[in-house]
Image (cartoon, helix red, strand yellow):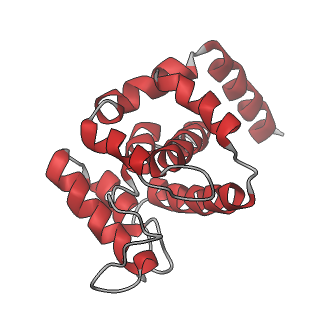
Amino acid sequence: MIRSIKSKLRLKIYSKIDLNAEYRQCVEDLITSPVVLSMQDFVQHSNLSCLEHCINVSYKSYILCKYLNLNYRFAARGGLLHDLFLYDWHTSKPENGLHAFTHPAEALKNANMYFNLNDVEKDIIAKHMWPLTLKPPKYRESLIVSLVDKYCAFTETLGKDNKNNIKKIEKIYT
């Protein structure tokens, strides 16, 4: 009962905050970076680009972590960079193994090259494919992004998160 009341109070508080502006503040420096914008050039799932997928994961992780009183800023940022591997995985095959197993390390390498990451953001990127990465996520935010990524990949592949839905999220940062 007390949990329910607290939850309703939190929702009232959130409704007074402009989540879109707050989300934009979390990722502004990343989303305007040419390297992040270049993810638009690569197809991820169905008819969505890698950038659209990452924005989808980032924003949904942000909302969920905010609701759970976790570090939503780290989740938003790590979620946006989690697939910064910068190649078309449909046509290019990594030399050191299958894409599903190798792209988290490649994304982390690229993200480290362009941005100053904290430990949580690094863990989010490195472990977003868990359990394929074997080592489990170290932080709750990492687990949230990993689960949200799987949900988004599933719905995007089925066409449930189509371009129109993603465009609504994209308007947040434009």
When asked about the image quadrant of residue 7, the answer is: top right
Indicate the position of residue 75 as horizontal and vertical percent values: 44, 46
Q: Residue furthest left?
A: 113
Query: Split into 4 quadrants, where in the image is the N terminus?
Result: top right
Closest to the observer, 48 or 80: 48
Above or below: residue 102 compared with residue 110: below
Q: Classify residue 106 as left or right of residue 134.
A: left
- What residue is shown at x 64% (from left), y 19% (from top)? 13
Q: Classify residue 159 as left or right of residue 66.
A: right
Above or below: residue 18 compared with residue 134: above
Indicate the position of residue 124 as horizontal and vertical percent values: 39, 58
- What residue is shown at x 46% (from left), y 76% (from top)? 100
- What residue is shown at x 49% (from left), y 56% (from top)? 43
Closest to the observer, 56 or 88: 88
Indicate the position of residue 155 as horizontal and vertical percent values: 71, 56
Indicate the position of residue 6 as horizontal and vertical percent values: 72, 32
Q: Classify residue 109 as left or right of residue 43.
A: left
Closest to the observer, 15 or 171: 171
Q: Residue furthest top?
A: 16
Closest to the observer, 38 or 2: 38
